[in-house]
Structures are given as C-alpha cells and as structure tokens.
Amino acid sequence: PTLLDAFKTALTSDQTDPAFLAKLLALPLETEIKEHFDVIDVDAIHHSRTALEQSIARELKTELTQVVDNCSQADPASIAQADIALRSLKNQALSYLGSLKDKWSNQLVWSHFSGAANMTDELAAYKILCSIGSEDRDNSTEQFYDKWKSDSLVLDKWFAVQAGSPLPGTLERVQDLTGHPDFSITNPNKTRALVFMFAFYNPINFHRIDGSGYRFIRGLILKLDGINQQVAARLAACFNQWKKYDSNRQALMKKELKAIVSSEGLSKNVYEIVSRALE
C-alpha cells in the first residue's frame, strides 16, 4: 500500500520531471533482483515481479491511462529532450497497462504499436506485445519485420525483443531464429542480439527446469568457438554463477560446463572461462 501511494502521488503530480518519473516507475529487472539472494529462485523472482507489476497496473489503471493519454500529445518527430522524456514516460506507463493482459489493455498496446509515428514508440509497444501472448507476438513480429527488414540495426532489435520474451516457447523460437535468413552466427552483432539476450537477460526461459536452455547455449558456445573465440568465451560466462542456483539447476549447468571443458580442440579463451567457473 505504501508503494502504491507513492506511485499514485508521483503519477498525479505536475511537478515531477517526466524523464525522472519514467525511471522512478521502472521496477528492477529480474537479473538485478537475483543479486540480492544467496540462492537464486528463478521462478519465484519472475512470478513475484510479474505479480507486483500487475498489482500496480490494476490499482493505478486510471492514473497510468491518463499518463499515456497526456504524454501521447508529444511531437513524435521531435528529438527535443522534453519530447523524448514524454515518450519514455508514456511507454513505461503503457508497459504496466500491457501487463494486465486483458482485452482492453491488449487493444490499447496494439493501437500504439500500429499507430506509432517513430521507431522508438513502435519498438516499445512491440516489446510489450511480445510479452502478452502468442497471437499478439506473432502478428506484431511479422508486421515489424516487414517494415524494418532492410535495416540491419533495427533487425538486431527485432531479434533481441523476441529473445527476451518471457512467454513459454521462447527457447524454441530462438532456436528457430538461429536459422533465419537474416541471422548469421558469424555476425557478432546478430549473435549478441539474439543469443546473448536469451542467455543473459531472459532467466525464466534460459533457466528452464529441464535444462534445455543450457544444452542449447552449450551447443552454440562450441559452435562459436570455431568461429570467434572471444565471442564464445563471453557467451560461456552466462554459466559463471551456476553455484548460486538450486541444486537441480546447479547439476544441469555443471553437466554442460563439463561437456564444454572436455570438448576436443577447445580454445584457450573458452577453456579459461569454463575451467575457472568449475573451480
């Protein structure tokens, strides 16, 4: 209740700088929350953060909707600091409303996606749609790709948003995307956008309890080791904190680390990272 009161006061005040308010309203990421625990409970962190986000959205739906409406008046083509701040605040409020995953909020986010007059707003709405449900994700993914497929830098964001989706089935989607015509494992930017995003910033899917996320990344580390040893070594660091997880996940990650370190022809770069992690 105290947090909700503070959020409501901030949302309804006309004295708060929009850029500061956008940062103030942002919940810590799951990858940040885990640093506060001796034993990382992937599922509890994910579900608790989601529940808090949805609770804030339900209780402050009116205030958040008003912020979205007010900030939507900003000039979409302007790069003035004031307009950039308003867009940031609008998209933060829209993200909360999108977490409700009901018909009204889904339509609201979709309208902001389809009606976006700049790539920043379109990308922000696309990210929300990729966390709502499979149909919204698939439709927005297709539309975003059709619009931006000729821009390699924007396609990096397209890959990253899909890899960061908390929805079930994201691992399988990322696996499919490694075979996409616009993806190349020899391109470090594409690899960071898709593979690193999944391994380092999508804990609920990377740390799947069946270990399939670990096996997938182990395979890519070994494949990358023959292409770019430095990139492979950086990717291998995703296993560095394996001892901080529950015993089941520890065993699964340790198994993959041992499989990597015992691989024939392993580079010195990857060997150093993995062997140090196993100590």
Image (cartoon, helix red, strand yellow):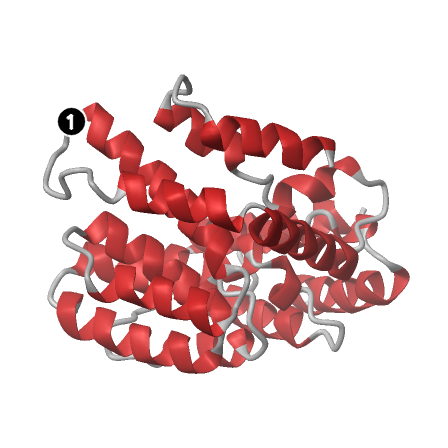
Q: Farthest top residue?
A: 15
Can I make out residue 161 in this image? yes
Question: Along the line of sight, which residue is nearer the eye, 183 or 201?
Answer: 201
Question: Along the line of sight, which residue is nearer the eye, 215 or 249?
Answer: 249
Residue 204 is left or right of residue 265, and the answer is right
Relative to 7, does residue 269 appear above or below in the rendering? below
Q: Where is residue 251 in the image (x, y as percent from the top left)?
A: 84, 66
Quadrant showing the N terminus:
top right
Q: Position of residue 4 (x, y in %)?
A: 65, 37
Q: Farthest right residue?
A: 247
**Which residue is tagged 1?**
80
Question: Along the line of sight, which residue is nearer the eye, 67 or 31?
Answer: 67
Residue at the image point whose x is 31% and y is 46% from the top: 69
Q: In which quarter of the image is residue 71?
A: top left
Q: At label 1, which amino acid type do we have?
A: Ala
Q: In which quarter of the image is residue 2?
A: top right
Residue 31 is left or right of residue 164, and the answer is right
Q: Where is residue 151 in the image (x, y as percent from the top left)?
A: 14, 60
Q: What SS does tag 1 mark?
A: loop
Q: Position of residue 268 (x, y in %)?
A: 56, 50
Residue at the image point whose x is 25% and y is 57% from the top: 122
Residue neighbourhood size for the residue with mark 1, other residues' Cα within 10 Å, grouped as few (<14), some (14–19), many (≥20):
few
Relative to 90, does residue 85 appear above or below in the rendering? above
Q: In which quarter of the image is residue 58?
A: bottom right
Relative to 15, does residue 143 appear above or below in the rendering? below
Residue at the image point whose x is 16% and y is 65% from the top: 148
Can I make out residue 189 in this image? no
